[in-house]
Amino acid sequence: MSPALWLDVGVVLGALLALLLMANGVRHVRRRHGVRGTIHGLSGLVVGCLAAIAMLVGVNLLTYARFTAEQPVATISFQELGPQRYDVTLVRHDGDIVRTTLKGDEWELDARIIKWKGFATLIGFKPLFRLQRLSGRYTHIGSEISRPPTAISLANDPGVNLWELAHKESGWLPLVDAAYGTATYLPMSDGAVYRVSMSVTGLVARPVNTAARKAVQNWD
């Protein structure tokens, strides 16, 4: 069962418990049991807030995909438009297509990874990844400094950003083992096609056709 599905179940159960506690609180107030009614009502509000937070985390986790071994995540192809300028097509593993223009000598693909520990792994939580950004870069540092980079975002962050929370509030997230970034980069070349996979150690890119293999062989 995926983390998002477990959270969905928790949200439903939490919401039902919150309604039950608040209903009991109202019933006790009507019977003039003010203290008991207040306790039940406040408990219902707390449980309801926790359920809402869990729902927001679940919405954010839906933007990630699970992986247990190396699996293809994208194919990237290039058509040269001019010196250090390329038309780029990225096809995700789910068939979604992203087209953009990058400047530079190399392309770089970034991703975010969330891994679990303890009880989360026992109930079936698998590592999650999400493609984050595609950008162009220059081989020589001088060009990188003097010329503005080109980049596009490949993700959005609805709900509660669990990846950022894992960095800022790690002590409050005992089930998160690690949340880190990974990236891979290779040269851009006219007609080159690369396949990118997610492995247990991070992103891995490999040339698919002759143009890509020649670009890698001649890469400075």
Image: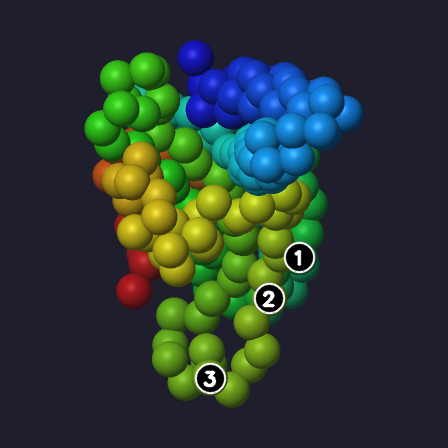
**Could you tell me if residue 180 is visible in this image?**
no
Question: Could you say where residue 153 lies in the image, as x and y percent from the top left?
Answer: 61, 53
Query: Crowdedness of circle 2 by 10 Å Cα count: few (<14), some, many (20+)?
Result: some
116 left or right of 31?
A: left
Q: Amino acid at mark 1?
A: Thr
SS for callout 1: strand
Question: Could you say where residue 177 lies in the image, as x and y percent from the top left?
Answer: 26, 40
Disc on res. 180: none
Tags 2 and 1 touching, CB below 8 Å: yes
Circle 2 sits on which residue? 150
Gap in angstroms between the C-alphas marked 2 and 1: 8 Å
| Residue displayed at 58% across by 78% down | 148
Circle 3 sits on which residue? 145
202 left or right of 102?
A: left
Q: Amino acid at mark 3?
A: Ile
Q: Quadrant of the N terminus?
A: top left
SS for callout 3: helix
Q: Is residue 170 above or below residue 68?
A: below
Circle 1 sits on which residue? 101
Query: Crowdedness of circle 3 by 10 Å Cα count: few (<14), some, many (20+)?
Result: few
> Is the image coloured rainbow, by chain, by secondary structure, or in one colour?
rainbow
Gap in angstroms between the C-alphas marked 3 and 2: 13 Å
| Residue displayed at 45% across by 70% down | 138
